[in-house]
């Protein structure tokens, strides 16, 4: 399966959930928001959200302050 992660093409050996993708890529989840195909996915759904071939995933780090 091929996906785009922040404009970088990745080939995944197995179908993964968002949570598994984050673990495989060794990404921290604190302050992280994820959009798949331009739709934000709630953090509570990351464990069950199944990635599909050609999904476009954008990771955003939430920053606070003024």
Image: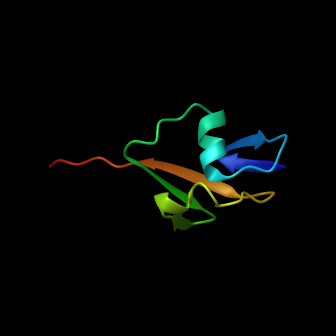
Q: Is residue 31 left or right of 24 when viewed as pictured?
A: left
Rendered position, 52 above or below 64: below
**Of residues 30 and 64, the one drawn nearer to the viewer in this rendering:** 30
Residue at image position (68%, 52%) is 17
Q: Is residue 64 left or right of 31 when viewed as pictured?
A: left
Rendered position, 32 above or below 38: above
Residue at image position (54%, 60%) is 35
Q: Quadrant for residue 57, please give it.
A: bottom right
How many badges with numbers are in the image?
A: 0
Q: Is residue 7 visible?
A: no
Q: Quadrant for residue 22, please give it.
A: top right
Residue 41 placement (x, y as % from top left): 53, 64
Q: Is residue 14 left or right of 51 when viewed as pictured?
A: right
Rendered position, 56 above or below 64: below
Residue 55 placement (x, y as % from top left): 72, 58
Residue at image position (57%, 66%) is 38
Residue 6 placement (x, y as % from top left): 59, 46
Specify the farthest residue to the top.
Answer: 26
Residue 23 placement (x, y as % from top left): 61, 37
Specify the farthest residue to the bottom.
Answer: 39
């Amino acid at each position: 399966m091929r996906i785009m992660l922040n404009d970088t093409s990745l080939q995944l050996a197995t179908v993964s959930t968002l949570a598994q993708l984050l673990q495989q890529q060794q990404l921290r989840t604190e302050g992280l928001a994820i959009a798949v195909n331009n739709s934000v996915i709630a953090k509570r759904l990351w464990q069950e959200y199944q990635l599909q071939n050609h999904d476009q995933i954008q990771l955003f780090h939430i920053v606070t302050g003024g």
